[in-house]
Amino acid sequence: MKIHRPDSHVIWPENFGRRFLISIDTEEEFDWNAPFQRDGHTTISVPKLQEFQEFSEAHAFKPVYFIDYAIVQDDTAVAFLKSVAEKKTAEIGVHLHPWINPPLVENINVHNSFAGNLPKELEEEKLVILRDAIRDRIGITPTIFRAGRYGIGPHTAELLIKHGFVLDSSIRSRFDYSGQGGPDFLAVGSEPFWWNGADRLLEVPLTTVYSGLLRKQAGLVAGIMEKYPLVNAVFSRSKMLERIPLTPEGISARETKEAIDVALDDDLRLLVFSFHSPSLAPGHTPYVRSQEDLDGFYDWWREVLGHLETRNVKPVDIGQMMAAAAGG
């Protein structure tokens, strides 16, 4: 599924200023290099959510936890999420991993790991079961969504609107997953937009920035870079064109600060950061393998948050963002 450049970008009011949002794909641990499977997962990193929450409160931002079915079945996670929901110190959304989310009827394979590839009725049933499980276990009915593996499909927006969702953050701008059977977001930038031109479902893409001498021509060469890793490596190493997503996973603080500056120079008013919750404990993702890596993870955030403060980019919560997108 190719997502084309939208023509209904949000026009932010002047008093919105420049803002940032930090989101966490809150999920089970699994082997990222192994085939998808329905069982054998763990939720060892769940207690580390509290540590990140304390960090976020100390730095005065409200994180967004997009949670999947494994997390809502974990009692420790539920207790933590109930607490932050009651105190309104974090936002909670839906994160659909179809291979572990009932009903478990489809074949497990790469194609079906993108929920948007499933039959419409099955995608809807999985969505509703997860939404209702969050409601029943945590006590809130979530209205914000991110597809696992960024796997939206031709019916996703329609289903989200039908079931009362007001915000989607499934698009990873400037990335293409079509080689695995997933969606193609190469033509989509980081600016939020309204699906189908109506103000019913706000899309808030994950921010990705092109940096380098050829960044103004990125649209012409991005497809070639995506298709040919060697070309991508040559452009990146030469600094002619680098694609920089806003994440501590695999991206240095130096690169991230550079991307922030480029985004602000291009008048991008909202910066959306993301990472996976298993990175909060050593040994569960390729990005945090040791305690030293975890210390570096928090150092990354301190450096990046300091740069955001220097550039007068302030945190935003979902309510503030929705109000501003709707016109103030």
Image: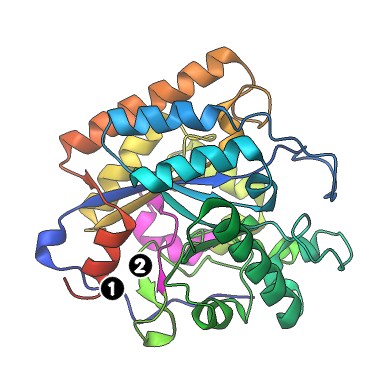
Residue at 34% over, 65% down: 191
Up-down: is 22 above or below 17?
Answer: above
- Name the residue nearer the viewer: 115 or 263: 115
The quarter of the rendered structure image containing the C terminus is bottom left
Residue designated by label 2:
192
Residue at 24% over, 60% down: 320
- Name the residue nearer the viewer: 50 or 23: 50
Up-down: is 328 above or below 209?
Answer: below
Residue designated by label 1:
10
User: What is the x, y in percent for residue 303?
Assistant: 32, 26
Task: Name the side, left or right, on which 194 lies relative to 150.
Answer: left
Q: Residues within 10 Å of mark 1 (few under 14, many from 20)?
A: some
Q: Residues within 10 Å of mark 2 (few under 14, many from 20)?
A: many
Please, what secondary structure does the residue beneath circle 1 have? loop
Disc 2 + disc 1, Cβ < 8 Å: yes
**Residue 204 sits inside the magenta stretch:** yes
